[in-house]
Structure formats: C-alpha cells, structure tokens
Image (spheres, rainbow, N blue to C red):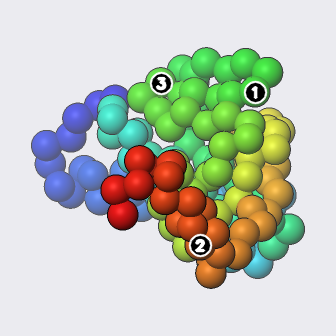
Amino acid sequence: MNKKNNYSEILKDIEKWESTRLENQNEYKKETMAVVRYRNRYGDEYTFTKLENGDVLWEGDFEYMRSGNDYIDPSGGPFIKIGQMLSHVVYGEGFNVIVEGFTNTKNGILINTKPHDYDPKDFRYLEDRDIIGGII
C-alpha cells in the first residue's frame, strides 16, 4: 500500500521479495508448470505458482483479508471462490482449472484445484440460433 516514487527503491524491494520468496520455497520445492504475478488495485503483488500436482500456491500479503467457507478476498483483490475458474482471475498459461478449496500454509495459501475438462472444438452451442432470436 506504500507508493514509491524512486525506481531504485522499487528494484531493491523486488530483489528483497524475490530472495525471501526463494528462501521460503523449501516446503513446495517442486517442478512448477507456470508462475504468474498479479498486482491488485492497491499495488500489492501476489504470485500464483502452479505445482506439479495441479494445485496452485498463492503467495503474498494476507494481513488484511476477508474469508468465508467458500472464498478468500485480500484487501484490494483478487477475490477467489470455490467453483470459480482460476483463469478468470489469473491470466496465464496453465491456470485453466477449477478452484476446489483452500489450505493455509506457511508459504501462503494452497489453492486446491481440479482440471477443467472441455473440448475446444465443441461448438454445439452455436447450433441453436433461436437463443438470440433468430438474428442469424
């Protein structure tokens, strides 16, 4: 939530954050499929790391957040809930999965996921043109 005007201070913060993040990876040090950084409306940065088993490790500042039985909402976002497709929040390759649950870890929040099964060549929904009033 702090705004920094000095570019060198921002670079130092990023280097410090990266070194801390790498030190804390011992619990989930596995081959990862994808890593995406997300910056919310307050400038807070979160990292989403897709793990080998398909789950996603969500790291960042969770000091101020709301949570319920089926959602987690850090101050400034992103709001993520069970049943949601993660790729609608995290725009990155390999995050086309459905959120099944959350587990707190010492490194952040582990998002339990399941694959989103779909056929990208299935266009049957276009056959019923009456849905849009027969405009076609």
Residue 14 in the image: state x and y as whole percent.
39, 57
In the rendered view, would you say 48 is above or below 45?
A: below
Q: Residues within 10 Å of mark 1 (few under 14, many from 20)?
A: few
**Residue at the spot x=64%, y=63% of the render?**
96
- Which is nearer the eye, 57 or 15? 57
Q: Nearer the viewer, mark 2 or mark 3?
A: 2
Q: Which mark is residue 123?
A: 2
Q: Is residue 46 left or right of residue 125?
A: left
How far, Cα to Cα, is label 2 from label 3?
A: 39 Å
Q: Is residue 14 above or below residue 69?
A: below
Residue in the image at 79% along x and 53% along y: 113
Earlier in the chain: of badge 2 and badge 3, it is 3
Distance Cα–Cα, label 3 vs label 1: 17 Å
Q: Where is mark 3, residue-wise?
A: 75
Vertically, is 64 above or below 125? above
SS category of the residue bearing label 2: loop
Report whether 88 appears left or right of 52.
left
Residue under label 1: 70
Tag 3: amino acid: Ser
Mark 2 closeness class: few <14, some 14–19, many ≥20 residues within 10 Å? few
Q: Earlier in the sequence, mark 2 or mark 1?
A: 1
Residue type at mark 2: give it.
Phe
